[in-house]
Amino acid sequence: MTPTQIATWLKATAKEIGFLSVGIAKAEYMEPEARRLESWLNAGHHGQMGYMANHFDKRVDPTKLVPGAKTVVSLTYNYYTPEEQIEDAPKLSIYAYGEDYHRVVKDKLFELIHRMREHVGQVQGRCFVDSAPVLERDWARRSGIGWIGKHTLLLSKKKGSYFFLAELIIDAEIEADSPVADHCGKCTSCIDACPTDAIAEAGYVLDAQRCISYLTIELRNEIPTEFRSKMEDWMFGCDICQQVCPWNRFSVRHDEPKFEPHPETLQMDREAWEEITEETFERILGKSAVQRTTFEGIRRNISFLNSTDDPSS
């Protein structure tokens, strides 16, 4: 098969398996992205996410992460749902409603590379789902899936941003796609809506230390009191910048059964969350991404939401 034929087959097969979109880029050193990452790290915007500074050379050069790599295939997997928790309940980001995406999406990647080996030949490489030093948003941008918006998430004109990113870094030569233009224009909806001012005034730079997702998931210390009145009831993650983004009017409901929430999750009221036991946590969230913050982490977050201490004291 020619590189063009492989690309055509790969995109059709990936969508047959369930992926939302597919883009292809040449595996090479990422010079401008390396400079931006270095600047972001030097500014301390990664906070306690020390792993972001690890394996810098592999993060900006896929041929060092996967020797012999020639192609980076970027894929998206839809998780959007219009379903919501009941009013006044502490909020979960909707990506965490169902089973942990790492396992669900990686199984799809394994199926895709298995089919590729049967159809194309003995392709060698690795599968990634937010689990290694891979600049996934930059690779998705390079492959033409979308552009990186002012909120620093990947955006698509036709599909919005409610999707997971995944990659195949492989040794096959496949015809590459071209990047698309930035369509954020003069819009500042995400910047204006962020309650903690985590997004730079001009956009495109996120100070993770001020991001509600970081504060409720990555931060292991106590949440700083300056954010006491700014959390807007988020106990795990935050969807605000996606909720206000005009491009997400094109989001459609996912069709992945494993992303359906446990029946109790959407029905628990504030009191139920405040009194949640470890047994209940494991029953309704034991297979979800919420495990990342742990039961004690969720308890800390809920307690912080309920605190009325004066942050100026």
Image (tube, rainbow, N blue to C red):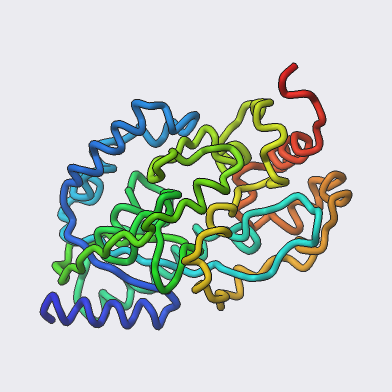
Residue at position x 30%, y 52% in the image: 138
Residue at position x 21%, y 45% in the image: 61
Q: Position of residue 127 (x, y in %)?
A: 35, 59
Nearer to the camera, 139 or 200? 200
Q: Quadrant of the C terminus?
A: top right
Nearer to the camera, 254 or 170? 254
The residue furthest top is 313
Residue at position x 20%, y 71% in the image: 122
Task: Name which quarter of the figure residue 98 lies in.
Answer: bottom right
Nearer to the camera, 70 or 119? 70
Task: Name which quarter of the figure residue 37 lies in.
Answer: top left
Q: Position of residue 153 (x, y in %)?
A: 43, 53
Q: Is residue 124 visible?
A: no
Q: Position of residue 7 (x, y in %)?
A: 21, 76
Left or right for 85, reference 269: left
Q: Is residue 244 visible?
A: yes
Question: What is the tally of numbered marks visible in this picture?
Answer: 0
Left or right for 133, reference 234: left
Q: Position of residue 90 (x, y in %)?
A: 76, 49
Is 131 rendered above or below residue 13?
A: above
Residue at position x 25%, y 82% in the image: 9
Q: Quadrant of the N terminus?
A: bottom left
Is 45 rendered above or below residue 108?
A: above
The residue furthest left is 2
